[in-house]
Image: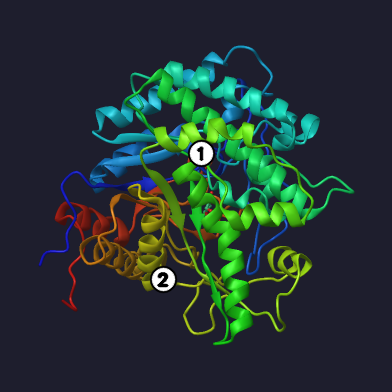
Amino acid sequence: MSLKMKSTFLWGGAVSNVQAEGSIAAGGKGLNVYDTLDVVPERGQRSIGDVNLASNHYRQYSEDIALMKEMGFKAYRFSIVWSRIHPNGEEETPNKEGLAYYDKMVDELIAAGIEPVASLVHFDMPDHLAKAYNGFLNKKTIDLYVRHVEQVVEHFKNKITWWITYNELNTAPFESMSGLVAGVHRPEGMSKPQFFHDIFYNTMLASSRATNIIKRINPNAHVSGMMTLNRVFAERNDSNDRLAAFIVNEFTHDLYADVFATGQYPDFYKRWLDLNGIDWCADDMAELVKASVSSDYLPVSLYQTRVIRFDRSIASVGDINEVLFEVPTQPNPALSASHWGWTIDPVGFRQELGMLYQRVGKPLFIVENGIGLEERNSLEENLENQERINYHNTYILNMQRAVHLDGTDIIGYLVWSPIDILSSHKEMGKRYGFIFVGPAQDDGSMPRYRTAALDWYRDVIAAGGVDDDEE
Ligand code: BG6
């Protein structure tokens, strides 16, 4: 049996433009939350790069698109940076220079035969909205976001049909990510459960309103909010560890999957809100329900799985909250991991895709998967990135098995990232690229180099997948 993918499968790659573009003040752009982020370095991080330079993609995107074409990309996911279009978020009309910039980029993609897949929020909320309103904690930000989306989509409606309303919604309510993802910090005196719910609800409402508007503007558009898959397993074969893992996954995966699928809160979540004394109003759910019906696919990212340990019984809502907000998860000691401790778990990937598809019942689009590798000392070593090839080979193989053996519907696979870009923690030495980006030259340009992974991926795309040697 051939495990290759159909010819319509969307092979390609993805970036977030704030991590790639640089030129943070060009073309009337305003600062956003990524530009101003005060990085708390992640485990293993060695340096903090320059956001004004990043990969100089702002000026060199044509070169990058040409190399993507060479790899045979069918689709490319990028973000239309919110603060390039509405520099402080409150302008009534869009910044023409910002629109013109993405117009040219999208035209080049289309000319190269590459389907544009556009993200509408990816770490790019205008800094002003974060500072003045505490981001998505304030309903005013939702209205400003919706106006932004409407103007962007009206402008691009004849060129872009694939939309992602919001990157990795299920990271927004957790304080380690909420500043970057939702422009928000928990106010003093607000409980963690209340914060969780307010951010969960406000960002899902924003994404749902955006989904409904996009479908109104173009009924043929493919649109959805997005989630990341980072399932937690029990560290030991122990019932309390297993229950703790189950609870974390309920709030980080099942809650989102259910709302994407039906627009309704699952029972475990309603009970948790009641136990924490949090009010919620069923009348406000209409936009979520409508979006769940009109959105026709679910975009997901996946990089790692984790494990959790909990040494006593979970016997009160306080224990549940402790598991959710206080107990750190860890890399899986039974599997290998990247330098940054991100567990490599391709079989977990297949299992995760199957579980999610069975829960949601919509085709899944893998819009990010990749491995951060340490930058090497010599250019040659950087170009021979065999570890990247091995990583994607096993993940693609497991995706093919998910499709052909498990019946999981998957419509595309986008690697993170075609080019080296800054990490979410602004580290350039954490390399993801199939195209290696060298240091800035005197004229400010950054040379692009084809790596071994580029040749390998071109052949995989041409063949429709990887061989299953264990067949
Ligand atoms: C995803 C984000 O979660 O992970 C990306 O959508 C991010 O923006 C990617 O870059 C990889 O994570 P990191 O922290 O290594 O950049």
Tell whether circle 1 marks a residue whose Cβ is less than 8 angstroms from ligand 1. no
Residue 248 occupies quadrant: bottom right
Q: Marks 2 and 1: which is nearer the front? A: 2
Tell whether circle 2 marks a residue whose Cβ is less than 8 angstroms from ligand 1. no
Q: Is the residue 193 above or below the residue 53 in the image?
A: below
Residue at 15 percent of width and 56 percent of height: 463
Q: Which residue is mark 1?
A: 17
> Callout 2, which amino acid?
Gly
Residue at 30 percent of width and 55 percent of height: 454
Instruction: Mark 2 or mark 1: name the one nearer the start of the chain.
Output: 1
State which quarter of the image contains the N terminus. Answer: bottom left
- Residue 18, image x and y in percent? 56, 39
Residue 111 occupies quadrant: top left
Counting other residues with Cα less than 10 Å from the Cα at mark 2, is it few (<14), some (14-19), or many (20 or more)? Answer: some
Residue 456 falls left or right of residue 168: left
Q: Which residue is mark 2?
A: 348
Alpha-carbon distance for marks 2 and 1? 29 Å
Residue placed farthest to the bottom in the image?
A: 237
- Residue 4, image x and y in percent? 17, 59
Residue 454 falls left or right of residue 137: left
- Residue 291, image x and y in percent? 47, 34
Q: Which mark is residue 32?
A: none
In this view of the protein, which residue sits in the foreground, 364 or 251? Answer: 251
> Callout 1, which amino acid?
Asn
